[in-house]
Amino acid sequence: MEGVGHVINQERAKEIGSHIYDFIKKQRETGMEGIDHRIVSVNGTKMHIAEKGQGPVVLFLHGFPELWYSWRHQIHALSSLGYHAVAAYLRGFGDTEAPASITSYTCDHIVNDLIALMDSLGLEQVFLVAHDWGTIMGWYLCLFKPERVKAFVCLSVPFAPRSPQMKPMDRIFQAPGEIEAEIAEIGTANVLKTIFSIRKPGPPCFPKGNAFGISTNASISLPSWLSEDELTYYVTKFDQKGFTGGLNYHRAIDQNWEVTEKWTGVQVKVPMKFIVGDLDMVYTTLGTKEYIHNGDFKKDVPFLERRCDGRGGARMEEGIDHRIVSVNGIKMHIAEKGQGPVVLFLHGFPELWYSWRHQIHALSSLGYHAVAPDLRGFGDTEAPTSITSYTCDHIVNDLVALIDSLGVEQVFLVAHDWGAIMGWYLCLFKPVRVKAFVCLSVPFTPRSPQMKPMDRMRGFFGDDYYICRFQAPGEIEAEIAEFGTTNVLKTIFSIRKPGPPCFPKGNAFGIRTNASISLPSWLSEDELTYYVTKFDQKGFTGGLNYYRAIDQNWEVTEKWTGVQVKVPVKFIVGDLDMVYTTLGTKEYIHNGGFKKDVPFLEEAVVMEGVGHFINQEKAEEIGSHIYDFIKKFK
């Protein structure tokens, strides 16, 4: 800092405070907070490990081009659940030593590294979790030393039994220095972005001269699950270390075949769960699906419990109970799981209880009773026909009656979109019933006594503004019917365009005839089917009536004009959320207006590169945010 002396923390107190906060915030956002690092001596090399927590050890093995950092989310999750999470930089990666010889990267060397690491931790056995090349080495560890692995969670790469007839086919990355030169030419950042974004079915081919298919000066987007700060961590480490160590795993494939001759035909006898995405290039490569599903995988790995597509709809419903409760004159469907303090989840539009499937599992596993209703008008909850039945007082009375039916005085409240709006009304009308509120996407909106909300919105955004377009009963429903529930939901779930969404008459959703609309990365076909089935059964009118009752809410809440919300609140929003990017919202959140209206607002978190459906797009992180906040009040 220019012009500043030695006692910098006092001379530039505010600036230093900001620097500290920005750095700590970055550490939290990039998953580094609370993780310890050290170097251990294993099998003649110095290995860097990252670790957190106490309890049984879960050993994480990364792939290529990855690092220990690929497991940052799981390290936090497992350590919070009573495990000692340990993630190593494998030989040749990051801050672990990288021998020069290709022969130093054969499976026997890597397995000996892992055995020595376990010994250094004073362990006889570990729970093993691995991905990509980490998985391949995990299979060798289970094959050579099954007594050291209590159970194995394997991602992406199934076991590959040794064929005695033929060496593995020489494939990409074999000639030392060749692919490294192409990486250097194109740049580490572009190469990593390209590899991390691969979703094309089948075996990846890297033609000479342009292995990664990157055109000069091309702008390559990050995948939705990776932030710029997270990418920077990878880029920095690979720029420091280079790619040769990791590439040498590919170059030692034939040597592994020679080393493992005596294990030909030997089964892997370790309890094992296998998880793969249906767009994974390994899964879509010729023969892999057949091997996994037709019995051969189970034959080679007899203790296999198989599961494909980690986001399958049926899987996400496992262990969740459903029932109908009578509340405020209607029958309400709720989904619930767990025992303990109640966490009440409120969904938005066009959503259902199902939007909280990830968090229901996460919070119930942490000692909470997770409860997610289908709100009035949605899913398997009754849908009164009158628009006046959807005003905030009716919805709040539904929620209070639900809380009463659960036999509790207070709940932890978590809500998104219209659920968040109704959550604010619950906190405003009945603050004694809410212990703390985690609010996603929609900040509090104080009542303006001067103008009705719909007049204000038409004046600001025009008649094509989506809320204005939803006002006429039956009109938008007819357009949805024309384009089909599937296409409409795909379109809405994929919205990432900044600013207020406008739905022009005639083609509200901008869908071209016979257009193929991709799913967002966070949603599977099975999950989409759940939504489509429920909305096809119920229709959209109940959910749309929340919009049609906006002016009536303004009338109902006259006596709450100027009243503050006095409940502890944590607010979380994506920086690509259409609500956040709408005129005036950022200023209200960050310039003091929000804190003035909600004096117990503890934190406003903005997640980079995340859209509106934040609880599904960043399911694990949102689960952690919820737990980190509410555990203070438990």
Image (spheres, rainbow, N blue to C red):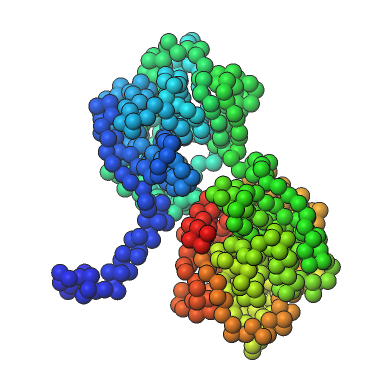
Identify which residue is drawn at 33% across, 39% down.
49
Q: Is residue 628 above or below residue 593?
A: above
Q: Is residue 460 above or below residue 622?
A: below
Note whether residue 610 is visible.
Answer: no
Residue 32 image offset from top left, x and y in percent: 37, 51
Name the outermost residue toward the left. 6
Q: Is residue 356 left or right of residue 213?
A: right
Residue nearest the observer in this picture, 422 or 490: 422
Quadrant location of residue 311? top right
Residue 370 image offset from top left, x and y in percent: 63, 54
Quadrant location of residue 39? top left
Total marks shown come to 0
Note whether residue 13 is visible.
Answer: yes
Identify which residue is drawn at 46% across, 67% down.
603
- The N terminus sits in image quarter: bottom left
Residue 463 image offset from top left, x and y in percent: 69, 76
Name the outermost residue toward the right. 385
Q: Is residue 342 left or right of residue 214?
A: right
Q: Is residue 301 above or below residue 218?
A: above
Identify which residue is drawn at 50% across, 20% down.
268
Identify which residue is drawn at 50% across, 50% down.
225
Residue nearest the observer in this picture, 204 or 526: 526
Q: Is residue 4 left or right of residue 405?
A: left
Name the outermost residue toward the bottom. 450
Quadrant location of residue 12? bottom left
Q: Is residue 194 left or right of residue 471?
A: left
Q: Is residue 510 above or below residue 307?
A: below
Residue nearest the observer in this picture, 221 or 271: 271
Residue 242 image offset from top left, x and y in percent: 30, 39
